């Protein structure tokens, strides 16, 4: 790779890092504001994708290929975390709906 190509690649990676960082700030806003839990799950998943992209760009920027292994491992863990969080929220909503239905029927246990 020539020096000019290296400079262009470094510049593009630096600009990409800035764009990803600003995107993460917007996603944090969505995670905090919600308004619903589904929005938070989507925001969490998007944050995971942005972190993987950030680590991959960091690998390009620094020239260290070990960061790509970190990105792959993080992507797998993030996927499992998102699925687990979504299932937790789904089950808590089902339990809440069942409790609401039993209260409407007058079935008070206790």
Image (tube, rainbow, N blue to C red):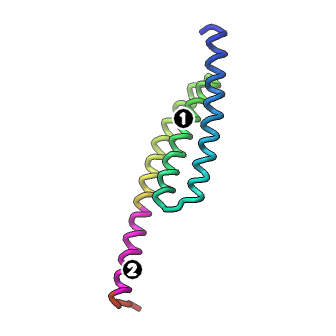
Residue 99: assigned label: 2
Residue 53 image label: 1
Q: Is residue 94 magenta?
A: yes
Q: How many marks?
A: 2
- Residue 17: which disc? none
Tags 1 and 2 in contact by the CB under 8 Å rule?
A: no
Which of the 4 image quadrants contains residue 62? top right
Residue 32 position (above or below residue 15): below
Q: Residue at x 52, y 51 (%)?
A: 44
Residue positioned 59% across, 9% down in the render: 1
**Residue 40 point in image, percent of width and height:** 51, 56
Q: Residue at x 34, y 89 (%)?
A: 107
Graded by Cα atoms within 10 Å as few (under 14), some (14 to 19) or many (20 or more), the crowding at tag 1 reads: some
Q: Determine the CA span between mark 1 and mark 2.
A: 42 Å
What kind of element bears circle 2?
helix
Identify the residue at image location x=52%, y=32%: 69
Q: Provide the residue span drawn in magenta.
A: 88-104
Prevalent SS, magenta region = helix
The quadrant of the image that shows the C terminus is bottom left
The crowd level at tag 2 (other Cα within 10 Å; few <14, some 14-19, many 20+) is few
- Residue that protrudes farthest toward the top in the picture: 2
Q: In terms of secondary structure, where does tag 1 sit?
A: helix
Nearer to the camera, 30 or 50: 30
The x, y position of residue 13, in whole percent, is 62, 26
Q: Closer to the N terminus: mark 1 or mark 2?
A: 1
In this picture, is 103 found above or below 89?
Answer: below
88 left or right of 61 in image: left
Q: Position of residue 47 (x, y in %)?
A: 54, 46
Q: Residue 74: image x %, image y %? A: 51, 41
| In this view, 42 is above or below 10 | below
């Amino acid at each position: 790779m020539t020096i000019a190509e290296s400079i262009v690649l470094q510049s593009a990676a630096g600009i990409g890092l800035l764009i990803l960082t600003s995107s993460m700030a917007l996603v944090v806003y969505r995670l905090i504001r919600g308004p619903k839990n589904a929005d938070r799950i989507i925001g969490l998943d998007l944050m995971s994708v942005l972190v993987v992209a950030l680590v991959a760009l960091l690998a390009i920027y620094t020239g260290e290929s070990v960061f790509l292994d970190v990105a792959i491992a993080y992507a797998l863990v993030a996927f499992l975390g998102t699925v687990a969080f979504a299932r937790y929220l789904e089950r808590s909503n089902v339990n809440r709906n069942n409790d609401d239905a039993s209260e409407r029927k007058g079935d008070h246990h206790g």
